[in-house]
Amino acid sequence: MQNSGTIFDLKPDTPHILLINPWIHDFAAYDFWAKPLGLLSLASMLRYHGFNISYIDCLDRFHHQAPPVDPHARFGRGPYLKTRIPKPHGLPDIPRHFSRYGIKKAWFNKDLLSIKPPDLVLMTSMMTYWYPGVKETIASVRKIFSSATIVLGGIYATLCNEHAKRHSGADVIETGAGEGFILDRIAEHTGYSVSLKYDPADFDAYPFPAYDLQQKIAYVPLMTSKGCPFSCKYCASRFLNPDRMVRSPESVIEEVKYWHGRFGVQDFVFYDDALLVDAKKHAVPMLEAIIHSDLDIRFHTPNAVHIRGISRQTARLMFRAGFKTLRLGLETTSFDTRDELDAKVTAQEFKQAVAWLREAGFHQDMIGAYLLAGLPGQEPADIEGSIDIVRQTGAMPVLAYYTPIPHTALWSAAVKSSRYDLESDPVFTNNAVLPCQKEPFSWETLSRLKHLTSVHP
């Protein structure tokens, strides 16, 4: 496996593109199967079209200068390296340390100096409130490659476009999927033009993401579909991916076999927003093919699956296929007021889905039901009641702290309810500070809720 700063297959007179996954600045961060799928997909696309590429992952847990880490522990998950840094302006009341998560600055600078100066730098961005890490990464690149054009894309760049233009330090801010603009941007900034070699409307035609650019492949994220048919008021999925695209089951199985056969990958992580939608045409044949392949592999769904898509058949297939970490998008058990959030599931559908999963063989600690905490106007008693109901069904409650997100239906209510000026700075939307609590941050309340989720009946 090549190291993160290596240029692959250099070709004379072909632009050199550097792709960077930036640092995270936060009160807490952990690698829960988190990879920059969009950026690695672009890397694969550019390599497919003959470009010289380099990739540096500022979050690399397996960096060659870092202490050795077992990539197979915890199904591939693990803690990032971290360095204590000052808290952001405006958050002095948070009684927690703030850190830069990822490789040390000296390591990053050394990686940058080890490669040929790039003709173009592509950087992604994830959580909106992580933008200070993006800003610091861009500033570090500027010090070494002062003349390189830096293009910023990703979630923060798309959701907070004007803020990114003013504060990120990037030369160009792009919104939406990079496949739609990247070749044009390269031609614009390097003068090198190439035509797209596949149909962007055909999801099966896309090359597999370039996970081989990593130091080690601890797990592989799978995107078998894009877009979501639901319009949940707290979620920006429809804004980020307005068009629904679905891969064929055959294409997905081919990718699984590729990473397992060539690199020995055992843990696969579904990144879909709607994995079980139209299950008879998509998930069912895909799961049946996985079972018939008889591979020693495991599957995880940290993005959650829609409960309404769980039937006796899909529950049995997921268990037989090797699903080990199953997360359900429940959000709340206050079904009488659920329309204020979404219309994804009823009380009976949730209970029946859990019953089918337990019948299929899933243990309670394998079935996690996400419960949103920190919603505008939400009382701790509502969360406590949801935790109790989830436990009664035989699932495990998992708290998911609400992040106010621009361009969602709940954004205006979040702005009104927050003790911070959310519109002035995305850093105030950090879910670790429960920004929609009117009262000062309460560690006692949070600790009590966490304790309730961990107590077994």
Image (tube, helix red, strand yellow):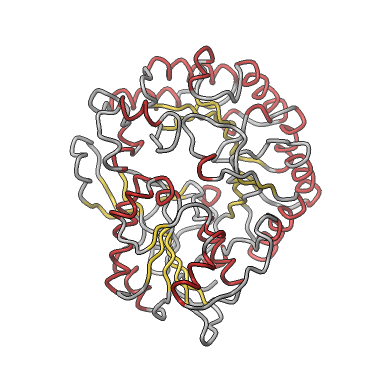
Q: Is residue 304 above or below residue 266?
A: above
The image quadrant of residue 404 is: top left
Among all residues in the image, which is located at the extreme bottom?
A: 12
Which one is in front, 192 or 245? 192
Q: Please give left or right for residue 415 compared with residue 384 in the image.
A: left
Residue at 38% across, 49% down:
161
Which one is in front, 341 or 368? 341
Residue at 45% across, 66% down:
19
Q: Quadrant of the N terminus?
A: bottom right
Residue 4 location (% of width, % of height): 46, 70
Among all residues in the image, which is located at the extreme top?
A: 336
Q: Is residue 99 above or below residue 49?
A: above
The image quadrant of residue 104 is: bottom left
Q: Please give left or right for residue 175 compared with residue 423 in the image.
A: right
Q: Please give left or right for residue 336 compared with residue 351 in the image.
A: left
Residue 325 location (% of width, % of height): 59, 39
Q: Please give left or right for residue 333 compared with residue 270 in the image.
A: left
Instruction: Please count the marks in the image.
Output: 0
Residue at 61% across, 46% down:
226
Residue at 33% across, 74% down:
110
Residue 237 location (% of width, % of height): 53, 40
Residue 96 location (% of width, % of height): 25, 39
Q: Is residue 415 above or below residue 127?
A: above
